[in-house]
Image (cartoon, rainbow, N blue to C red):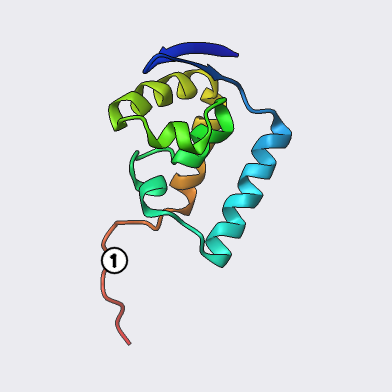
Amino acid sequence: MDAMDINGRRVTVRELTVREVRAWFKELDSRVQHGGFDLVDETLFADANLEDLLIMTDLNREEMDGFTPSQLAAVLEKVREVNSHFFDQRRRLIKVAKPDDTPQAPQSV
């Protein structure tokens, strides 16, 4: 665990357990299958969503909504540091899941 002060609030950042990482991936799969994505939550940062910050800190949704993006970026930086294995795994999964962007030659019939 680690902590930092943001906006007059002491924010505790914790490392996820393997069990929590598994649960996170199951929840993500469920959201993908059944909808439920919030555009702000999912797109404010390139490599994390706001739900990640809720899981990895002691912040609640109301507190988080009162922070500026730059304040949340500082929290995310600490979250990345404490949960580096999680973010490395996430990058590997995105790389595997991302379609190959290499142009393909047309196939003749």
The residue depicted at 29 percent of the width and 57 percent of the height is 102
Secondary structure state at the residue bearing disc 1: loop
Q: Where does the image place residue 17, in percent across and percent down from the top left? A: 69, 28
Q: Where does the image place residue 77, in percent across and percent down from the top left? A: 40, 22
The residue depicted at 34 percent of the width and 40 percent of the height is 46
- Report if residue 91 is visible in the image: no
Q: Is residue 8 above or below residue 93?
A: above
Q: Is residue 10 above or below residue 51?
A: above
Q: Where does the image place residue 13, in percent across and percent down from the top left? A: 54, 20
Q: Nearer the viewer, residue 48 or 53?
A: 53
The residue depicted at 48 percent of the width and 49 percent of the height is 96
Give the residue type at disc 1.
Gln
Query: Where, quadrant-wise, is the N terminus in this rendering?
Result: top right
Q: Where does the image place residue 31, in percent across and percent down from the top left? A: 56, 58
Q: Nearer the viewer, residue 19 or 5?
A: 5
Q: Report the residue that reaches farthest toward the bottom.
A: 109
Q: Is residue 71 above or below residue 24?
A: above
Q: Report the residue that reaches farthest toward the right.
A: 19
Q: Nearer the viewer, residue 27 or 91?
A: 27
Q: Which residue is mark 1?
A: 104
Where is residue 16, by image quadrant? top right
The residue depicted at 33 percent of the width and 42 percent of the height is 44
Q: Is residue 105 above or below residue 17?
A: below
- Report if residue 99 is visible in the image: yes
| Residue neighbourhood size for the residue with mark 1, other residues' Cα within 10 Å, grouped as few (<14), some (14–19), many (≥20) | few
In the shown orientation, is residue 62 left or right of residue 72?
right
